[in-house]
Amino acid sequence: MFKILSKKTLVQGKVILIRVDAPYIAKKAKPGQFIILRVNEQGERIPLTIARADTQSGTIDLIFQVVGKTTALLSTKNPGEYIQDLVGPLGRPTHIEKVGKVICVGGGTGVAVLYPITRGYKEAGNYVISIIGARTKGLLILENEMKEISDELYVTTDDGSYGEKGFVTDVLRKTLDNKKDIGLVVAIGPVPMMKYVSLLTKEYGVPTVVSLNSIMVDGTGMCGACRVTVGGKTKFTCVDGPEFDGHQVDFDELEKRLSAYEQEERLSMEKFNCTCG
Amino acid sequence: MEEKKKREKIPRQKMPEQQPKDRIHNFNEVPLGYPPDVAKLEAERCLQCKKPACVEGCPVEIDIPAFIKLIKEGEFLSAARKIKEKNALPAVCGRVCPQEVQCESKCVLAKKDEPVAIGRLERFAADWERENGEISIPQIKEKTGKKVAVVGSGPAGLTVAADLIVLGHEVTIFEALHKPGGVLIYGIPEFRLPKKIVDAEINYLKSLGVRIEVNWVIGRIKTVDELLEEYDAVFLGLGAGLPLFLNIPGENLCGVYSANEYLTRANLMKAYLFPEYDTPISKGKRVAVIGAGNVAMDAARTALRLGAEEVHIVYRRGREEMPARKEEIHHAEEEGIIFDLLTNPVRFIGDERGWVKEMECIRMGLGEPDASGRRRPVPVKGSEFKMPFDLIIVALGTAANPLLTQNTPGLALNERGYIIADPETGKTKKERVWAGGDIVTGAATVILAMGAGRKAAISIDEYLRTQKW
Ligand SMILES: Cc1cc2nc3c(=O)[nH]c(=O)nc-3n(C[C@H](O)[C@H](O)[C@H](O)COP(=O)(O)OP(=O)(O)OC[C@H]3O[C@@H](n4cnc5c(N)ncnc54)[C@H](O)[C@@H]3O)c2cc1C
Ligand SMILES: Cc1cc2nc3c(=O)[nH]c(=O)nc-3n(C[C@H](O)[C@H](O)[C@H](O)COP(=O)(O)OP(=O)(O)OC[C@H]3O[C@@H](n4cnc5c(N)ncnc54)[C@H](O)[C@@H]3O)c2cc1C
Ligand code: SF4
Ligand code: SF4
Ligand code: FES
């Protein structure tokens, strides 16, 4: 059992941060790694990135978007309550090194996943340019936190309610046009966003890392639920990833695999709304 | 003389079973177990051999004639205790051991007649003990103050833990999943091995004082070297959990599962109870299972119970070569599963939404025997054909998962990634580290994993007492 110590709403009813007591995991967690949790005995196992780990207090922060039954259920849990199971840290840590100038691109809740990685690049002595986006102003998360660890920060919203109107790819193109010495792009967000960022950076010949969010069960390489095609080969996201070379990933296949349980997910959510009011 | 004649007339007692037409609609156990009088009758058949050959066929050397005699005398609890002297998981082994190639294959009666139903009797005694709430706890030796870490809670790890705890050592099991039991929990389905039985066996270990830490992936949260700082000895019972795929086009379509994923969703996550349980599972109408081992039979029979209209086993070799137990093949056939033998998939074809809709196969002929002694299947040119399927389960077997081994310097692996360990002691090339079960032998059986655990426990105990590696 893992105790929830505190809870903060980042976007009303949509994006929530919880701090969980998990000393052993906190001690080992590195940027880019995730945990898998199960809220209760009937629960599904879902992966969430370790947004922040604090060795001193033995806590980890999870930032999640409410998209379906499990995240909705998790959002009803309050400080003092428990999560039944939590396992980690899983996945390969981000390979962080000094490359010079790095652009970190985040979309939606992807910014939560991007945040610890961006900090890693900053701490390794890179010049960090961050571009974060959301559909609309109210959905933007971690702007201040990202600002603190970036040398430059740009914000976009699809509807123009805040920052620049448009997509993160628009700002990315401008930046790549202006700065010829970008060593690496890191892109994390919805699959279509990562796909278009990768197509764009391929044009410019800039190496690009993406973090994939495939459906998982065990997270240890035992089931193969998380398989993705990278460079024509099957990889398991949970042990070979979650980060891969964006220029090699078959995003269309990933998008289709993510929709495998649409019907069941809808049913689960309806049932949850019924019982939860 | 009279008595001998009478005994010889008793036929091997049949096991009552759920009827196929009923059982394909539920997840309840198929064989129902012997009633006490039938068990006693079957026990009568045993000749009580002075040099019992059956015992040689049992990897953990249960005193088979002794426990059978106790059943014959109606001393069911004592029978269970007799078995437990050698085997901590009798209710499991009585159900899933391939007795026909182990203990029962050696029984002297097998020469002219049918062997004594040792497995069924073992199951009977264990069930009797559990159902009558009379679980006894063995005498635990004085505490030694030595600490042992066991990684993995499958049959190998559970056996090591059970053996070492009674010898007075402190034992902690670390398990990656949220529930202990290994394949017994996540792989073998409820209708073959009810999970409450595995839970009872695990509770028994806990009652002996074994600590079980779930949600611990060793190699990530702690390395083996870190465990060695805290513990005097480490046993690795990791199993062979890495699923193999065919590597043919279309394998990543939606609706194509590894058997591991399919069975884990169904068993560990209880997806057959969706939406009461949250984990979903695709319920195919026309299902193909690729492969013909025990795992394939389990997947096929699970698909049937989840409501499939037609389930095929697709296998590239012939009937004689199918690796599954005869009993499992028989059960699958009774339940209406269709066997497409000498048939090999070449690709899976999807619809525009990315879901599998068809499988293209090629017919196979049998050529010369290969390294395994089985005739090698060879494709028949131009014999490709398609069959419609909306769910495909790939059950080709498993390999060694590198997650822990690649993070453990000093551990020697063979070319296929399995840990090299001494077959007699379980010692690896790394000091104070032992290994056993599927991670050493490759996918095998529950009882062989237990046998390896037993040998490792003896070696670990010796090391802990003498400090000699
Ligand atoms: C490595 C990794 C890290 C992630 N980190 C974060 C994070 O930090 N914050 C965050 O908000 N989200 C994160 N996700 C996504 C998160 O796991 C899903 O949003 C969550 O599983 C949705 O579950 P649900 O029951 O609420 O929704 P559902 O209605 O069940 O599903 C909504 C969508 O989520 C995806 N999904 C469903 N089940 C799973 C599953 N078992 N595993 C993975 N995806 C699934 C599917 O695409 C589905 O369409 C991460 C995913 C991965 C693989
Ligand atoms: C579907 C199926 C049906 C089968 N049917 C039969 C049968 O009828 N009869 C029979 O005799 N055998 C059967 N087998 C084979 C038998 O189950 C295995 O041979 C046996 O379970 C092997 O035991 P083990 O202890 O080596 O490993 P496992 O049972 O595989 O257990 C290993 C455990 O270690 C854990 N683990 C792995 N890595 C780590 C890590 N890094 N950190 C922490 N924990 C870890 C795993 O999560 C798992 O729980 C079947 C197998 C399957 C898959
Ligand atoms: S444990 Fe298995 S092999 Fe040994 S006697 Fe029992 S059924 Fe036979
Ligand atoms: S070999 Fe057969 S008959 Fe002889 S003791 Fe064993 S079970 Fe009984
Ligand atoms: S989640 Fe099971 S193998 Fe990756």
Image (cartoon, coloured by chain):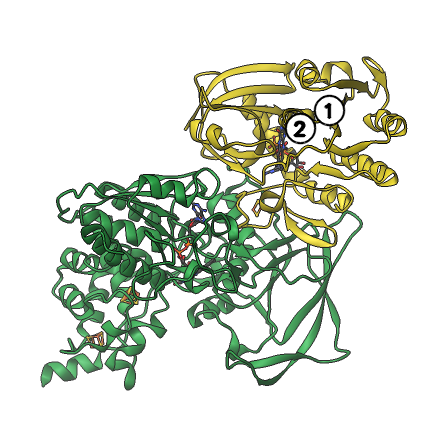
Does residue B128 appear in the picture of this structure? no
Give the vertical position of B239 relative to B271 (above or below).
below
> Which chain is rendered green in the image?
B
Which corner quadrant holds the C terminus of chain B? bottom left
Left of A2 or right of it: where is B99? left
Q: Chain of mark 2?
A: A
Q: Secondary structure at mark 2?
A: helix
- Which amino acid does the dot numbered 1 rest on? Val
Task: State the hue of chain A.
Answer: yellow
Left of B155 or right of it: where is A124? right
Question: Which x, y percent locates residue B366?
Answer: 61, 83
| Label 2 sits on residue | A121
| Label 1 sits on residue | A128
The total number of labels drawn is: 2
Q: Which mark is residue B368?
A: none
Which corner quadrant holds the N terminus of chain B? bottom left
Question: Which x, y percent locates residue B464?
Answer: 22, 50
Q: Disc 2 and disc 1: Cα gap in Å? A: 7 Å
Q: Nearer the viewer, residue B325 or A157?
A: A157
Question: Which x, y percent locates residue A102?
Answer: 75, 29
- Mark 1 surroundings: few (<14), some (14-19) or many (≥20) residues within 10 A: many
Callouts 2 and 1 close, C-beta under 8 Å: yes
Question: Which x, y percent locates residue B6?
Answer: 16, 81
Tell me where residue A262 sits by quadrant: top right
